[in-house]
Image (cartoon, rainbow, N blue to C red):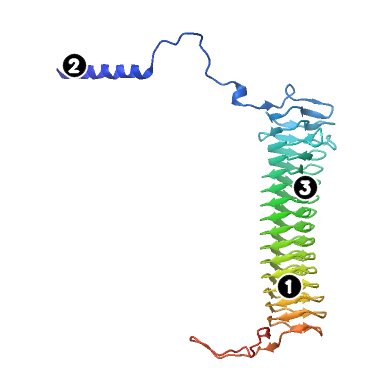
Amino acid sequence: MNRTRIITAAALTLVAAGLLLAGPLDPPAGPVTSTYKTLTEVEPRIAINATNTPGDANSLFKITQRGSYYLTGNITGVAGRHGIEIAANGVTLDLMGFDLVGSAEVAALDGVSLGVGNLANITIRNGSVRDWGDEGVDLESSINSAVIDVRASGNAGNGISTGRGSTTTGCSAYANGGNGIYTSSGSTISNCNARSNTANGIVGESGSTITGCSAYINTGSGISTGSDSTITGCTASFNTGSGIVAGEGSTITGCTVSNNTDNGISTSFGCTISNCTANNNTGNGISANNGSTISNCTARSNTLDGISAGIGSTISNCTARLNTRDGIRVTSGCVVLANTCTQNGNSGDGAGIHATGSDNRIEGNNCTFADRGIDVDFVSNIIIKNTCSDNTINWVIAANNVVGPILDRRAPASAAINGFSAPSSLGTTDPNANFSY
């Protein structure tokens, strides 16, 4: 077999193999059917338009059946009508990145509104709602609603309002005439921001959870909640009211509040505040009502007190520095434990720690560079294991208190130490002694 015959045989073999892999050339018997999906199968949603969702006297478009809907373009408001009105349960509306914009003629009307109260399971997502005569998105009368990735700006009322048990995620609210974002009880707000709104930035009623949000330059408070709420990892700055306001029994953790015109953080009774920072607020850095717990917080350069707490509160392991009045101020029945207070009374008059009432336990604190280190105005307090240094007066304590011995150790008290042991220079073995040093 010569070379030409070998090449020809190999080519024929490859062609035969290709034919086998390609399958039969003749079509099967019967009519030819399409293998393509219908548009409804590909996009199982309903477009918002005059045919599918015709409006009425109150709205440009109206959704009256449950289902998934989407915009195909921008919507511009007209006089006397909401943009989109929802009148059914179980509706999802995808704005598809488009813009629902009102106009000067649209008075007291919403971009997205509910035509029926107590609707459930409504979701609005992914778009912009602005310049409406009332609210941008108004789901306040709904239950278990969700608003996701919506931008609400320039609306005369609230930017976004949701009802009980709602979720608001990834939204922004800018320059609205009411609150930026408002939610009813038992709701969750996460990763949202509210800026330059005429009322509060973010409001959650009782039982709300607010996480990872920011509130900036709002005319009211930055973030405000009702009772039994949780606020975590939020920032509130340059608001005309307080940075964060929380109702009774709430928890605030890991938040930063600065440059607010009122208090940085202001809470009602029985709240827990931990790992927060409050700087440069015109009021108190942190102000907590009776029965609260404040721990591991920092309050610096606030115009009034760094940390102020009501009857029966506990303040521990906090740092208060450069506040104009007291670093820490308590009334009665409080525990003030292991705090660091320095340079308070800054350009004003203040103590490191100031107790104005009775039955407080002031223990293990270090107070330096203030007008007064520890200042106790009334009877029946216990003051033990504290240290004070470089205050104008280290100790100002009223009569009839329980005080561990106060030792003046301001003069050098020990020789240089270089080794493994040295004698005590404390001057006492009393475990409850207080020291000036």
Q: CA distance from mark 2 to mark 1?
A: 103 Å
Q: x and y percent of residue 102 in the render? A: 78, 35
Whichever of callouts 2 and 3 sits on the residue coming sooner in the sequence is 2
Query: Which residue is identified by label 2?
Result: 5
Asked if one can make out residue 324 in the rendered structure from this viewpoint, the answer is no
Report, in whole angstroms, how far the alpha carbon at label 3 lies from the one at label 1. 33 Å
- Mark 3–mark 1 contact, CB under 8 Å? no
Quadrant of the snapshot with the N terminus: top left
Instruction: State which quadrant residue 217 falls in.
Output: bottom right
> Mark 2 is on which residue type?
Arg
The residue to which callout 3 is attached is: 185
Q: Name the secondary structure under disc 1.
A: strand
Q: Amino acid at mark 1?
A: Val
The x, y position of residue 92, in whole percent, is: 69, 33
x and y percentages locating residue 202 in the rendered image: 75, 50
Residue bearing mark 1: 335
Lower position in the chain sequence, tag 2 or tag 1: 2
Asked whether the residues under the numbered discs 2 and 3 touch, taking CB atoms below 8 Å apart as contact, a structural biologist would say no
Q: CA distance from mark 2 to mark 3?
A: 87 Å
The amino acid beneath tag 3 is Ser
**Is residue 331 left or right of 12 when viewed as pictured?**
right
The residue mark sitting in front, 2 or 1, is 1
Q: Quadrant of residue 89?
A: top right
Q: Is 10 drawn above or below residue 142 in the view shown? A: above
- Say few, some or many: other residues with alpha carbon within 10 Å of mark 1 (under 14 / 14 to 19 / 20 or more): many
